[in-house]
Image: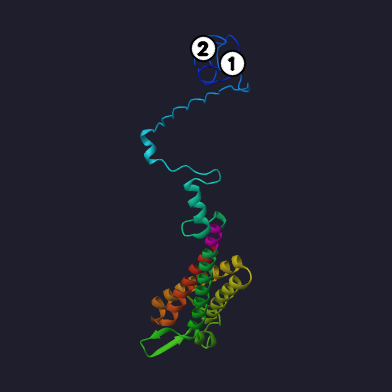
Amino acid sequence: MFCQECGALMSDGQTFCDDCSGRITKAGVGHPEPFAAGAEILPRPAEAPQQQYFAPGDAFAPPPRGPNELPPGIAECQQQSQFDYRYTRPPIAVEARAARALTYRNSLIAAAISGACGLLVFVSTFLPWISFGGLFNASGWSYMNNSSELGGNFLWYSGPGYLFFTGFFSMLVGLAVIAGAALFLFRSMALGARTAQVAGGLGALLALINLITIYSRIGGSAIGIWVFLLFSIGAAISGELCGSR
């Protein structure tokens, strides 16, 4: 049998249609077989359009995406990573490599300063160390060459309550600091930094002892002994900076 409303095929004795839910008033009464000669097939009634429901926030919702379209946030990030690197965070390995390069560059600068300090300590040997009332200036080199005439040796002069080191030590300290800086730059960084640090510290100690002897026993100091002291301290500090990289 067929439905009286939509013409759908139904089982005999069925009360309601499965398609249109229409009630069958007379069982077995319906449209004739659709393929029977001269039978009239009634058209199926049009379905009423369904009303679409909109939520309050749908006005601000993004437009629907296609099946292969990425979300806006991911698409923007992908486009930015391809064309703009200003806001991308560099990898940790790149940051560590940049930090090591900066530290190494600072160590090279400290090593160059240490070498310059060693050169000035060496040059201080030939500058005046002692001034006798502005009339006579004696250098560390002159004390080393005239040691026999002054009652000492080429290393130091000593007596009751005083000790004075000649220019031999300023030359030795200056050469040691320069050698330490060269070792740091071209061969062994740790050994070079330690050599410059120890040599600078020793030179500062010897220059300080000479200054105490000068002011307590001999006379006034001149520029050479101060160059010996200050740049020995500078060599020790720069050597420490090189070793702490």
The residue shown at (60%, 65%) is 190
How many numbered marks, from 0 up?
2
Q: Which of the 4 image quadrants contains residue 226? A: bottom left
Q: Which residues are magenta?
A: 94-100
**Res 24 label:** 2
Expressed as whole percent of the image width and height from the top left, the position of residue 10 reads 59, 16
**Res 107 label:** none
Q: CA distance from mark 2 to mark 1?
A: 10 Å
The 10 Å Cα crowd at callout 1, few under 14, some 14 to 19, many 20 or more, is some
Expressed as whole percent of the image width and height from the top left, the position of residue 18 reads 55, 18
Marks 2 and 1, the one that precedes in the sequence: 1
Expressed as whole percent of the image width and height from the top left, the position of residue 71 reads 49, 45
Quarter containing the N terminus: top right
Q: Which of the 4 image quadrants contains residue 225? A: bottom left
Which residue occupies the foreground of this view, 77 or 14?
14
225 shown above or below 46:
below
Q: Are marks 2 and 1 in contact (CB under 8 Å)?
A: yes
Magenta stretch contains residue 95: yes
The amino acid beneath tag 2 is Ile
Magenta stretch contains residue 138: no
Which residue occupies the foreground of this view, 2 or 172?
2
The residue shown at (48%, 70%) is 205
The residue shown at (49%, 80%) is 120
Can residue 239 be seen from the camera position used here?
A: no
Residue holding disc 1: 10
100 shown above or below 30:
below
Expressed as whole percent of the image width and height from the top left, the position of residue 244 reads 53, 62
Q: Which is the main secondary structure of the residues drawn in magenta?
A: helix
The amino acid beneath tag 1 is Met
Quarter containing the C terminus: bottom right
The 10 Å Cα crowd at callout 2, few under 14, some 14 to 19, many 20 or more, is some
Label 2, secondary structure: give it. Answer: loop
